[in-house]
Image (tube, grey):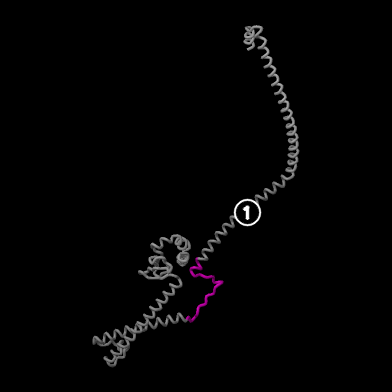
């Protein structure tokens, strides 16, 4: 570049050379001025940096002193900290063991409560708290036994009288046992008397049947009012239960006896029972309690009618 400038300057005439040098001189002075200005700015920045460095050094010294103080304090507390950490770990393990034991005891308590509820629903009781007294001469048992004997005697007497009437009407000889039982003296009068006795026995049996039907109807009505279910025998060993709170007349439950004594009952599927899946799973499958299931269904139907 210097050679190019020299060649360029050599081509210029003396009159042209002076303005060019003046211009270059001015440019050099301007560059020098900018350099001085930049140096002044750098000196200011350097002084500021030195001040900040001094402040940072003082802060570092202060932090170093605090760090040494903390190290000395930590040296005195390391031993107690190790002992405390061991105690905390042992306490944590003991708490975890106690929590596990508490969870196990709560689960056993729930199982025992469910068993106790099931036993109470089945009619069990605690002999240490409840004392059952049985009469040696129970009036109800005696009355039932007397009624049974009376019915049996009347049935036997009626059968004997019917056999005697049949024999007398046929004109055949009367057997000794029937003759002794009937004490026949005159056949015609005795037949009339026997017919009256037969009619009286049949009338008594009719009255007994009417009484039994009345009692049965009364018993079914009382059961319906107490339990909320009307119980009908559809076929052999099959029972239909209809709730008094049923929304539709076809909403009923079917139970079938699976044992001759009727101890075990099984719920049969109906259109209404298919809507009670939650109650069936809880009370029949899980709790194994038909009374609890029927009570839950009654409360559900009653709440529907109440809120509607």
167 or 300: nearer the viewer: 300
Q: Quadrant of residue 29?
A: top right
128 or 227: nearer the viewer: 227
Please provide percent x and percent y for residue 224: 43, 72
Location of the N terminus by quadrant is: top right
106 or 206: nearer the viewer: 206
Residue at the disc numbered 1: 95
* Up-down relation of residue 306 to residue 152 (above or below): above
Q: Quadrant of residue 153?
A: bottom left
1 part of magenta stretch: no
Query: Circle 1 sits in a helix, a strand or a loop, which is it?
Result: helix
Please provide percent x and percent y for residue 36: 71, 21
Q: Which residue is rendered at x = 44% and y = 75% of the image?
A: 222
Residue 104 showing in the rendered view: yes
Q: Which residues are magenta?
A: 118-138
| Outermost residue, front side | 15
Going by the image, does 305 lie left or right of 79? left
Please provide percent x and percent y for residue 147: 41, 82
Going by the image, does 81 lie left or right of 277? right
| Outermost residue, bottom side | 185
């Amino acid at each position: 570049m210097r050679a190019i400038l020299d060649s360029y300057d050599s081509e210029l005439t003396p009159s042209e050379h002076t303005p060019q040098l003046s211009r270059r001189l001015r440019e050099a002075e301007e560059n020098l001025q900018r350099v001085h200005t930049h140096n002044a700015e750098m000196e200011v920045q350097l002084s500021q940096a030195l001040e900040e460095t001094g402040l940072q050094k003082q802060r570092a010294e202060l932090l170093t002193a605090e760090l040494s103080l903390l190290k000395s304090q930590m040296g005195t507390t390391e031993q107690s900290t190790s002992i405390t950490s061991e105690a905390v770990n042992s306490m944590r393990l003991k708490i975890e063991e106690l929590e596990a034991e508490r969870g196990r005891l709560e689960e056993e308590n729930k199982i025992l409560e469910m068993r106790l509820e099931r036993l109470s629903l089945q009619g069990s009781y605690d002999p240490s708290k409840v004392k059952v007294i049985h009469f040696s001469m129970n009036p109800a048992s005696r009355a039932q036994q007397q009624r049974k004997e009376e019915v049996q005697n009347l049935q036997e007497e009626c059968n004997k009288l019917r056999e005697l009437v049949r024999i007398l009407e046929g004109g055949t000889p009367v057997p000794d046992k029937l003759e002794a039982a009937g004490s026949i003296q005159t056949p015609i009068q005795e037949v009339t008397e026997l017919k009256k006795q037969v009619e009286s026995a049949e009338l008594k049996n009719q009255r007994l049947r009417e009484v039994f039907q009345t009692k049965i109807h009364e018993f079914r009505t009382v059961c319906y009012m107490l339990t909320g279910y009307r119980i009908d025998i559809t076929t052999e060993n099959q029972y239909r239960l209809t709730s008094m709170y049923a929304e539709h007349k076809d909403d009923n439950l079917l139970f079938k006896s699976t044992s001759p004594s009727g101890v075990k009952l099984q719920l049969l599927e109906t259109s209404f029972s298919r809507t009670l899946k939650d109650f069936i799973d809880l009370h029949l499958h899980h709790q194994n309690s038909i009374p609890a299931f029927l009570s839950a269904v009654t409360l559900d139907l009653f709440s529907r009618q109440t809120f509607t």
